[in-house]
Image (cartoon, rainbow, N blue to C red):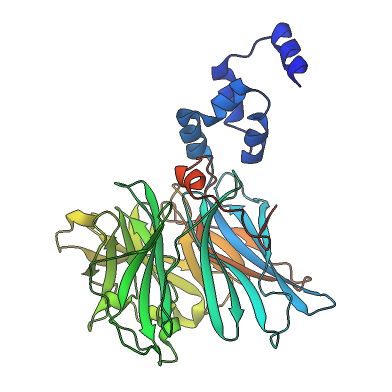
Amino acid sequence: MDHLVKKMRDDFYLDEGLVAQILVHLPAKSVIRFGAVCKEWLGITACPSFVAAYGRRCPLEVLLYTTRRSRTTAASVELQELDALDVSADRPVPPRRPLARYPAKAGLPRDCGRRQYCSLVASCDGLLVLQNGVLADGDAREQYLVCNPVTRQWSDLPRLRLGRNVQVRQRKCGFYFHGPSGEYRLLCHISFTFTAWRRAPCYCILSTGADRPRQLSVQATPIDDRRVDSDLLFKNLMTPAVLHGHLHWLKHMEGGVADEMVAFDTVAETFRRMPPPPVTFRESSNLLVGDGSLMASELGHLFVFVDLWVLHGYAGPAATGEERWVRRHRVEVPWQDDRLLLAEGGDGGDVLLGSRRGVVAYNVRSGTVRQVVGVDASRHDIISPSRRVFRESLVRHDFFEARPHPGLPLFRFC
């Protein structure tokens, strides 16, 4: 390889700036491979200015799940395929880019003593958070891992250390970047159940690179886990709307008696309540960011359209109390489905609406709707759009070196 590189240098010379302009237009996998050609190109691909420029050019992608059923000699296994879909307007028929494959359920029958599981928890700045665990004799032992699908680096988050006869219910509330420390953090609500001694609930922070969890000083609101609908009430905890350095939830444990909207300051790590949008059924509504504004969705009559409410006058920590919700958009959807999901669609003013029947993009600036992906009725695969978005990143974070992890055998990158 070295003599080929030397011969190329003798025949012609490529300026580093020209090489960077070429590489910034290539797919992430190609950039990683070209970085292994020689030290000069590795230096280009690792340069912070190149990494930042590449990140700005990467399109925002929505993550799609496809569940396929396959039968082995041991049991029937559900294979989860994770694809990334470019939703930019300049590509009317975007291809689905395979990202990873993993079993939704372990290849062991339910009456077996141990069952492994793996699931995607969050996505942020090109990082994926995965939950891995083993269910043994009714006791779930969970572990959270952070990975970069581009650089194929892995790290684990610190685990909760519990004593004997202590059982907890752990609700994940959001994964975010903490600017002052440069850490990525997972916020968790902890409830102590079926213990020999009772403790008040609390919030814990699992930080990248840290050795142990850290408890927040804020007081946590208890949750009645005996309610059948407790999980349904807080189903969107891990997909908050991120705007002005805050995580926003339409339904949250800290909403109080009035069931207000909740915002979490990712710098000060404190909660505050906000006036909710005047939607009729908040359980079927989504909170999202579109065109730089905080929005809330509301399903219309017979599920044939969706109304979008916009919070005017909102500026994050500089809130004046004069913010007001205004219904600005009505989007007609091509199918009737009461399980409609909404997600942000990038910097072009798009809002994504998805269901098991496909994904459409509505542009809040032009008021136009275009279909992004449809479902092939001839196939028996189950397609599930998610509210998670992804943007490839070449950043090699320090916590991957400080706390490396070999990765998950169940989770295979494509």
Q: Position of residue 99 (x, y in %)?
A: 65, 54
| Residue drawn at (29%, 46%) of the image | 180
Question: Residue 19 occupies which quadrant of the picture?
Answer: top right
| Residue drawn at (40%, 92%) of the image | 227
Pick the front one: 334 or 145: 145
Question: Residue 276 occupies which quadrant of the picture?
Answer: bottom left
Q: On screen, 258 above or below 53?
A: below
State whether residue 135 appears in this view: yes
Q: On screen, 380 above or below 409?
A: below
State whether residue 353 appears in this view: no
Pick the front one: 373 or 209: 209
| Residue drawn at (35%, 81%) of the image | 280
Q: Could you tell whether 215 is left or right of 285 in the image?
A: left
Q: Position of residue 308 (x, y in %)?
A: 38, 66
Q: Could you tell whether 66 is left or right of 302 in the image?
A: right
Q: Position of residue 285 (x, y in %)?
A: 41, 74
| Residue drawn at (57%, 53%) of the image | 405
Q: Could you tell whether 231 is left or right of 12 in the image?
A: left
Q: Position of residue 135 (x, y in %)?
A: 60, 79
